[in-house]
Image (tube, grey):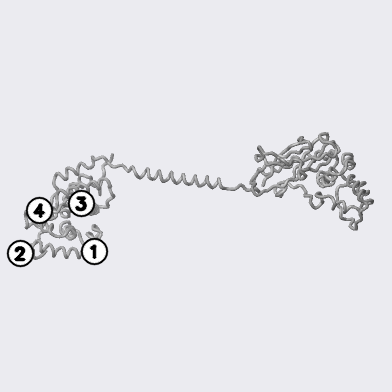
Amino acid sequence: MAEKLFAGMSYDRVLHKYADTVAGVCVMRLRNYADAEDCFQNTFIKLFQKSPDFMNENHLKAWLIRVAINECRNYINMNRRFVPLSAAKHETVELKENENDISWAMLQIEPKYREVLYLFYCEGYKVNEISEILGKNPNTVKTLLKRGREKLRKAYGGDEI
Amino acid sequence: MKKVNFDALSHIKAPQTWIEKAELIPEMPQKKNSVAVPYRAVAAAALVLVSVVAVVVFMMFEKPSPVNDGSLPLSQTEIETSISTAQSNSKASETDVSDMFKKFPETENNTVSSEAETKSVSSSTAPNAISTEQRQAATASTTEPAAVTTPSYTGETTETRSAETQPQTTPIVSTDPPWTPTEITDPTYGFEELDVISVAAVFPSSLITDGEPIYCIVQRRGYAVGSIVKDRFADYRRAHYTVLKNGNVFAGYDEKIDRSDLHGEVTYDYFFYNSRGEVLVSDYTTVYL
């Protein structure tokens, strides 16, 4: 059986190249490594099973991010009713030790701002690309980006972003 | 004052255990698309089944066209079987069958009249019998000599009749019910036979005595099983007949039918029998309605 190729790359190569990206999206969204792992695995399971035709690596990367975000949303929706009250008050955040870390600050703001900020600053996407990945209007993305910066400033305590 | 350094976010690394588990994904049993193919197969099969059922139902409810039915001539042939037999016999007796149908009233008159008159039936042809009656009715006066028009008489008889009985012919016709010329219907078979079917048969004249009335029963095939005919010798069952020169008797009978509940081919069995109930001849006819 011929090996599946994704934008000209093998599955293992795609996995090692974009594992950190998918993991970052999942962790940023779920703020929990255990939950993030499930979404991480589901993302790559879908990649292998669906085997969509990608035009290039950017397309592949955007597809992975989009699928990871959707997996996280589905995971939250499915487990929303089963989150204990204690866990809701004291969410598990492994990155909490270093409050100077921007990652910790990111986790303090709402998920919708987190996604936009992460894609914009960490993955280097532009507003139009983020709007395509998230399926939102570019103006909405700009608004989320602006408000997310303000919230991140308050959480992190920085002067400028 | 702190500056936000987003590079720190890039340091989120996927744990090695995650990657190791993800590497095993290709070795997982792949889900086969086991739903789509059966679904399509079932949908196609259902479509074909519905189409076949629709065609079958359409064929079942489709009425056969009586005009274009190829079997129609055959049925009509069956109907006219007795007529063809009569025609062959009439050729031998040098008499036209169509003329004999028109002679039934005169012959019927003879069967119900006196014995002397019946002798004239058995010993001569119908025109002679009519001439006899016309002579008997010569006392009746009339002013309509052209009222009687009985065709197919021989030249001699016609001349004699026209010379002797022209003024007396009309009362004879009007005083002998029910066989008046206006009530006689030419035998028609096939499409145009709607409310009355005429049956006919030929049998040897030795089976009946002179002047003996004969009767006829017409029964729809399949509907007479177990039935008892109580009025076998009723007047309306009497058949008209004439004795041919070749020693045979040509008998005819008209039966009214209710065609409201008849569809397609209907076969009628008919029996001619004498006053003692002995069947003289039986046959059947098929009518396409």
C-alpha gap between disc 2 and disc 4: 22 Å
Q: Which circle, 2 or 3, is nearer the viewer?
A: 3
Q: Is residue A68 above or below residue B122?
A: below
Q: Which circle, 3 or 1, is nearer the viewer?
A: 3
Same chain letter for marks 2 and 3: no
Dots 4, 1 in contact, CB < 8 A: no
Assign a secondary structure to mark 2: loop
In-image side of A157 versus A47 (left or right): left
User: Which residue lies under the disc numbered 2?
Assistant: B1
Tag 3: amino acid = Asn
Asked if one can make out residue A57 in the rendered structure from this viewpoint, the answer is: no
User: Which residue lies under the disc numbered 1?
Assistant: A138
Tag 4: amino acid = Leu
- Which mark is drawn over residue A79? 3
Assign a secondary structure to mark 3: helix
Tag 1: amino acid = Pro
In-image side of B239 versus A102 (left or right): right
C-alpha gap between disc 4 and disc 1: 31 Å
Q: Outermost residue toward the left?
A: B1
Q: Position of residue A116 (x, y in %)?
A: 18, 60
Q: Which circle, 2 or 4, is nearer the viewer?
A: 4
| Closest to the observer, B86 or B200 | B200
Q: Chain of mark 3?
A: A
Count residues near mark 3 (Cα–Cα under 10 Å), then give few for <14, some for 14-19, many for 20+: few
Same chain letter for marks 3 and 4: yes
Count residues near mark 2 (Cα–Cα under 10 Å), then give few for <14, some for 14-19, many for 20+: few
User: Which residue lies under the disc numbered 4?
Assistant: A95
C-alpha gap between disc 1 and disc 2: 32 Å
Tag 2: amino acid = Met
Dots 3, 1 in contact, CB < 8 A: no
